[in-house]
């Protein structure tokens, strides 16, 4: 940096400090965060004073002007940077005691390259881990306690967060987080036109976001198979890993209805502790399947998850039946004798001695009988029958989970008739 540039940088730092000094009294009286933001914007828009002088200085800076009024693009969205964002961020950095020289240097680097990596985070209920574990390339599970407080946890019971009066109702507390790293790319542009250029470019960004969410959903499916209990994403967000980009666009979040779903309260209070090897091996096996087979497995696991979350035995039986049909009868064009085929195929594929196979055969037949009653009658019968149905459905759900895991690890669906005829091709 030349001597002239040093002087300009020193002048800018003095303006930031003077502006912060004018803002500080409003921060010292315990104002709400939203009121503080309004105060800063009002001072920046004033005709005189250090804050407005700071905004003018930034506007005339050839490099930082892009960070003042450019376009910041994320995975699934983007937005124009309002001219108060950058000076507000610098004022806050000074009030928080940050190194202004380092902050400005990082901002100039971002303005010059426009690049940042991103980190997508998905809050989970139903599973936990003791330490961060890598389960696939660019993907890991981390303990919920490892995530820093602040914007990324605002959907919890934070009385100072906007909308907290709504979020104060009972929620399913996250027990772990799934993180997916997203490679560095250009995120800061002069305008939206420069960022996207055409609608096709915008569609590509949207497709990438869908792919990230699809990867997370597949990981949750594998987690459910390992845990044998419901696992769900209750919130998600993604943020820039570049600290300067985060200054310009603080992390926002979204949450799903599962955060209030009563069926997830038990898994939230008593999560399954994940082991790295078991999960990573099943996730890798899932990725190794052909695309059409992955769709079948997704359907089966999703229906299993619904069955485990249902409160009605009728609904549990129907969803379990669909899961069994998907995993065992996916190849059939002829839908005749479904109950027998499910029972014989499932028992043969799971293996064991003759007595064990017979027990599994009978269990799967009974489970499918309950599915048929539920579909055709809307009821499973008397109280005593319902008690038997509850036990059968619970045991058959675990068998369906074992079937899905075995298919996953095999890398493809079996040639079913080989198992039915007693031949072994494991």
Image: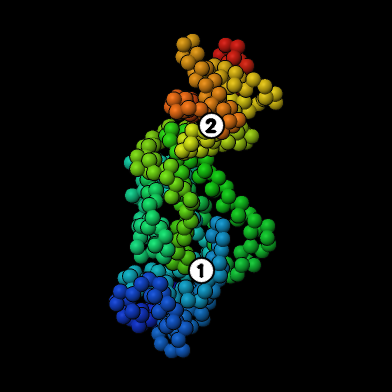
At x 58%, y 27%, the residue is 372
Question: Foreground residue, 71 or 404?
Answer: 404
**First in sequence: mark 2 vs mark 1:** 1
At x 52%, y 55%, the residue is 184
Please tell me in which quadrant of the rendered image residue 299 appears: top right
Decide: marks 2, 1 in contact (CB < 8 A)? no
At x 58%, y 30%, the residue is 377
Q: What crowding class fits label 1: few (fewer than 14 Cα within 10 Å), some (14-19), or many (20 or more)?
A: many
Q: Which residue is mark 1?
A: 111
Q: Is residue 183 left or right of residue 42?
A: right
Q: Is residue 200 left or right of residue 30?
A: right
Q: Which residue is mark 2?
A: 379
Please tell me in which quadrant of the rendered image residue 169 appears: bottom left
Q: Secondary structure at mark 1?
A: helix
Res 162 seen here = yes
Q: Report, in whole angstroms, how far the alpha carbon at label 2 lies from the one at label 1.
A: 65 Å
Residue extending furthest toward the front = 382
Name the image colouring.
rainbow
At x 52%, y 33%, the residue is 314
Question: Foreground residue, 225 or 207?
Answer: 225
Res 413 seen here = no
Q: Position of residue 168 (x, y in %)?
A: 37, 58
Q: Position of residue 167 (x, y in %)?
A: 40, 58
Residue extending furthest toward the bottom = 48
Question: Foreground residue, 236 or 101?
Answer: 236
Q: Position of residue 71 (x, y in %)?
A: 56, 68
Q: Secondary structure at mark 2?
A: loop
Q: What crowding class fits label 2: few (fewer than 14 Cα within 10 Å), some (14-19), or many (20 or more)?
A: some
């Amino acid at each position: 940096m030349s001597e002239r540039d040093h002087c300009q940088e020193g002048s800018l730092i003095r303006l930031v400090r003077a502006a912060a000094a004018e803002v500080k009294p409003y921060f010292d009286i315990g104002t709400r965060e939203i009121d503080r933001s309004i105060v800063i914007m009002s001072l920046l828009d004033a005709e005189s004073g250090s804050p407005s002088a700071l905004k003018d200085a930034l506007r005339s800076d050839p490099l930082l002007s892009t960070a003042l009024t450019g376009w910041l693009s994320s995975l699934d969205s983007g937005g124009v940077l309002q001219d108060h964002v950058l000076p507000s961020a610098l004022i806050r950095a000074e009030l928080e005691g940050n190194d202004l020289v380092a902050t400005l240097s990082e901002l100039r680097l971002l303005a010059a390259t426009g690049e940042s990596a991103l980190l997508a985070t998905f809050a989970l209920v139903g599973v936990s881990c003791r330490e961060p574990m890598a389960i696939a390339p660019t993907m890991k599970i981390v303990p919920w306690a490892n995530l820093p407080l602040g914007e990324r946890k605002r959907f919890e019971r934070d009385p100072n967060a906007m909308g907290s009066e709504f979020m104060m109702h009972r929620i399913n507390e996250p027990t772990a987080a799934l993180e997916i790293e997203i490679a560095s790319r250009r995120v800061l542009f002069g305008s939206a036109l420069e960022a996207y250029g055409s609608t096709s470019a915008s569609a590509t960004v949207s497709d990438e976001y869908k792919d990230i969410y699809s990867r997370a959903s597949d990981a949750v499916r594998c987690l459910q198979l390992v845990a044998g209990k419901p696992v769900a994403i209750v919130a998600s967000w993604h943020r820039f890993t570049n600290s300067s980009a985060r200054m310009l666009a603080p992390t926002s979040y979204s949450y799903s209805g599962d955060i209030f779903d009563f069926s997830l309260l038990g898994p939230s209070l008593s999560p399954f502790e994940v082991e790295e090897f078991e999960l990573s091996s099943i996730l890798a096996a899932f990725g190794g399947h052909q695309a059409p087979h992955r769709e079948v497995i997704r359907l089966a696991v999703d229906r299993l998850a619904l069955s485990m979350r249902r409160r009605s035995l009728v609904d549990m039986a129907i969803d379990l039946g669909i899961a069994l049909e998907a995993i065992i009868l996916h190849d059939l064009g002829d839908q005749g004798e479904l109950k027998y085929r499910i029972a014989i195929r499932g028992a043969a594929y799971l293996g064991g001695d003759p007595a064990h196979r017979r027990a599994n055969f009978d269990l799967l037949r009974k489970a499918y009988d309950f599915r048929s009653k539920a579909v055709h009658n809307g009821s499973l019968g008397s109280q005593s029958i319902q008690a038997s149905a509850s036990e059968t459905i619970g045991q058959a759900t675990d068998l369906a989970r074992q079937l899905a895991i075995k298919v996953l690890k095999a890398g493809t669906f079996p040639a079913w008739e080989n198992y039915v005829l007693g031949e072994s091709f494991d």
